Image (cartoon, grey):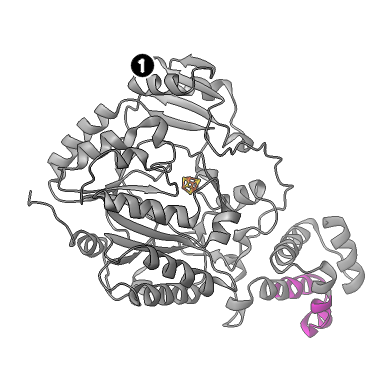
Amino acid sequence: MRNNLKYLLEEKFNFILNNNQLKDIARLFHEIIQRDEISDENIIRQLEKNDNIGNSKGKDKFQAIKRKLITLRFPLTSSRGKINSRDVYLNELKPPLRLPDFLKKDFVPEKIFIEMSAKNSYLLKRFNAQFPDTPQEELNHLWEYAQKHRFKLEDLKRPLVFIAQENWDFIKRCPCTKDHLGCNYWIFNLGFGCPYDCSYCFLQQYSNFPGIVLPANLDDFFEKFDSFFKKINRPIRIGTGEFCDSLALDDITGYSKQLVDFFRDKPVFFELKTKSANISNLLSLKGAPNIIISWSLNPQELIDSQEFGTAGLIERLQAAKQVRKNGYSLAFHFDPVIYSKDWEKSYKQVIKQLYKCLEPGFKWISIGTLRGTRKLKSASELRFEGKNIFYGELLLGSDKKLRYPKFLRKEVYTNMLKWIRSHDTKTPVYLCMEDTDCWQIMDKKLTSAKQIENYLLANNTFTSI
Ligand code: SF4
C-alpha cells in the first residue's frame, strides 16, 4: 500500500513525501479505509477538494494533508474543534501475524508444566485425572521455561498450562490509572492468562509468557489474606479476574469451591468476574450474599466479533439467574463499552435483556469505555486483522492511554445510567477508571476513591468487625 500511496499522492499533489511523512499518512489512510470501508481514491478525492492543500507547498502541503486526514479519521471530535496532533497515535503499519487457531470450544492443554514444588498438589491431581494423556514437563521454576523459549506474541494463547507455587504476588491494590478515580478494589491474584481471546484484552501487551499460569498453593493465599485482613481490619471489595477470567477453567481447577468456602464468613465482598457460563462448581455449593458472581456484558454482535471463545449474552444471563437462585449476589460490568454509530441501539437492548431476565437489585454495576495503552493497540491489530476497534475515535489522554474524548464518554455514561435507572433505582452504578469531571454526570457525584468505596460497600450484609 505504501508505495502505491506515495506514487498517488505525489502525482496528485505535486510534492515529494519523505519516509516519516509517508508513515503517518499511510497509517491515517489505513485506519480510515478499514473503519469506513472506503477506497483510497475516495479519500484522495476529499483531499483534492481541500483548498488549504491546494494552496500550500512542500512541508506545509504535508501538514495540510495530515490535518485533513485527521479530521476524516476523527470526524466527531473534529466537528468540535481542532485536534492536537500530539494526541493522535500513529504507529507504524505492520503486516498482521499469522496466528494458529488455538481456541477450542473446550479447553484442552497442549502440555502441562509443573514446578517441582507443586508436584504433589491437588491441582496437578485434577489435571492428571482430566487430561491423562497430555504430555508433562517438570521445571525447577517457571522462569526456566522463559529462559529456554523466547516469548512471541503468536504464542500468547498457546494452550500451555503452568502449575506453579506462587510466592509473592498474593494480594494487591488495583492500580487504576494516573489522574483517574480508583475505587479501592483489591486483587486476589489467582492465575495469569486466559483461554478466551478478547481483542481489547490488556494481557496482549502486558504478558510476556504464553498460556496460563495457575497457582497450586491456595492455602498460602488464604494464610496471606488472613494476615493482610488483620492489618487492614475493615470491609473491602476483593476479587480475582484481573489477569484471567475467574471461572473460565473452574471445572478443571475447582478453585471456586475453596474460595467460596473461605470467604463466605468474612466481612468482605468477594467477587468472581467472568464471561463464561462455567458455574457447575458454584451450583454444587450453597451461595452466600457476600460472594458476588459478576458478568461482563456486551451486545451479542460484539461478543461474536471481539470476545472470542466466551459465552454468549443469553448464556451469561441464564448463568447469572441460576447462581442467584443458589444464594450468590450478582454484579455486572459494561466494560468496555465500544462506541460505534449504532452503539445506543445495541447497548439499550442489552440493558433491556438484562432486566427482562433478572429482577433488579445487584451489588453493583460498572461502566467503562474502551481504553488501552499504545502498545495494546499495536498488539491487538497484529493479532486481529481488519476492522479493529482501536480504529474508533480514540485519542491519547493525560495518562497516555487511548480513550474516547470526554464528550463521547459522557454521552455513553449519561445514556447508560439513564437506561439502567429506567429499570433499576437500587443498584449502585460506578465508573471504572474515570476522572472527577465524568463522575459529575452520575447520580452520585463522588470525588474520591474512598467515597466510591463507601458507596459500593454501603449495601452490605456483614456483621461489624
Ligand atoms: S476474558 Fe478477560 S482476561 Fe480473558 S481474554 Fe477476555 S479480557 Fe482478557
Measured along the vertical axis of the image, is residue 62 above or below residue 334? below
In this view, the residue in front, 91 or 60, is 91
The N terminus lies in quadrant? bottom right
Camera sees residue 386: yes
Q: Residue furthest bottom?
A: 51
Location of residue 9 (image quadrant): bottom right
**Left or right for 453, reference 383:** left
- Residue at the image position 69 percent from the left and 65 percent from the top: 35
Q: Is residue 434 something one can see in this rendering?
A: no
What residue sits 53% from the left and 27% below the top? Answer: 109
Amino acid type at circle 1 is Ser
Counting from the top left corner in percent of width and height, residue 344 is at 51, 74
**Residue under numbered circle 1:** 117
Q: Residue furthest right?
A: 11
Segment tinted magenta in the rendering? 45-67
Q: Is residue 363 magenta?
A: no
Q: Nearer the viewer, residue 257 or 48?
A: 257
Residue in view at x 66 percent, y 55 percent: 91
> Horizontal placement of 444 versus 216: left or right?
left
Q: Residue 288's spot in the image, x, y percent?
A: 21, 47
Residue in view at x 48 percent, y 39 percent: 194
Residue 88: percent from the left, percent from the top?
Answer: 61, 65
**Which quadrant of the view contains residue 230?**
top left
